[in-house]
Amino acid sequence: MGGNSFGTLFLVTTWGESHGKALGVVIDGCPPQLDLSEEDIQKEMEKRRPGQYAGASSRKERDRIEILSGIFEGKTTGTPISIIVWNEDVDSTPYDEIRDIFRPGQADFTYQAKYGIRDHRGGGRASARETVGRVAGGAVAKKVLEKEKIKIMAYTVEFGGIRIEKIDYEEIERNVLRCPDRKAAMAMERKIEETKERGDTLGGIVEILVRGCPPGLGDPIFDKLEADLAKALMSIGAVRGVEIGAGFGVAGMFGSQSNDPLGPEGFEKNDAGGILGGISNGDDLLIRVAVKPVPSIHLEQKTVDSSMRPIALKIKGRHDVSPIPRINSVCEAMVAIVLADHLLRQKALDPSSRHWWSHQDRKDKK
């Protein structure tokens, strides 16, 4: 009950609120003897830290992580890994004025309807700040995947209606929007400035590429790999849609067009997005998510208060113009958690499988 945990063998549980004392994560099921340091996790946290571009929230959080358990002498012990991040720059004052008002596009109304009580400060548990724990958990999952040479990369392909025209993976690290098209990135940055001046917000599309995923991951029928990936990504607050491979494009294709021909060298194209029958086929995994605009806008909106009286609301406070690019790191984290979980499940199914680091370690030592 509660919906705060994700995974089967690699289990991640996040906790904490936006304006509480701290947030964190507990990771259960991480294999022992993996090299893991606070620095490994911190480099992932830096990608989602607030205040990194002109249209970002002015909230100043260092997001410094502390590992409380599960690590001894720089290695995982196989016991639960607990990680905490202290909130340092909390200002709940703007929220006190609207504590009895339901903000449009937010979870205020639904949390009140479900629990009969809610933390009005910054959205509480429903805040995007909850993703601190996801990214920390995803960093641990990436260490598991590292043993199998599986790499995950999330990048912006559309933002505020501006679409990329090419993909240069090296360009992703060169601009704040993590966009693989330099020309498009510049146009996107101008769009941020224009939108911020109007007091409005933007959404977009993030693509996640997974390279090195071995064939055989995924458990039909209800635990198909794409089903778990979709659930993981849809659990991110700002994500409103997920597609794999050609996605909705297959609706306009003939079967002769959507099928990926298979030859001696492998698949000749990848409209399947690296998954067939719910199981990875050894090709790249290709996933896209639709990201909605941040609902906290500085324009006047119609809503009601807790007594259902009409209210004209103008939100104050510190908010991003868009969940992008900070959400990109969250997408990477959730995909990493799913893949780490399915690697462990594959081991349980086939102990001799090559998808297992201890087996590979023994080979390396020979």
Image: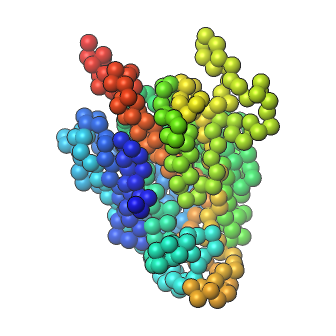
Residue most extreme to the left? 73
Q: How is the image coloured?
A: rainbow
**Residue visible at 35% across and 31% down in the picture:** 348
Q: Nearer the viewer, residue 247 or 19?
A: 247
How many numbered discs sit on the rendered protein? 0
Q: Is residue 263 above or below residue 163?
A: above
Residue 196 horizontal/vertical position (percent): 67, 66
Q: Nearer the viewer, residue 54 or 77?
A: 77
Residue 89 horizontal/vertical position (percent): 41, 70
Quadrant location of the N terminus in the rendered image: bottom left
Question: Does residue 207 appear to the left or right of 254 in the view shown?
Answer: left
Question: Does residue 309 appear to the left or right of 26 in the view shown?
Answer: right
Can the viewer see residue 357 in this picture?
yes
**Residue visible at 69% across and 19% down in the picture:** 261
**Residue visible at 47% across and 78% down in the picture:** 116
Residue 119 horizontal/vertical position (percent): 45, 76
**Residue visible at 33% across and 48% down in the picture:** 27
Q: Nearer the viewer, residue 210 or 324?
A: 210
Residue most extreme to the top? 264
Residue 210 horizontal/vertical position (percent): 53, 34
Residue most extreme to the front? 221
Quadrant location of the C terminus in the rendered image: top left
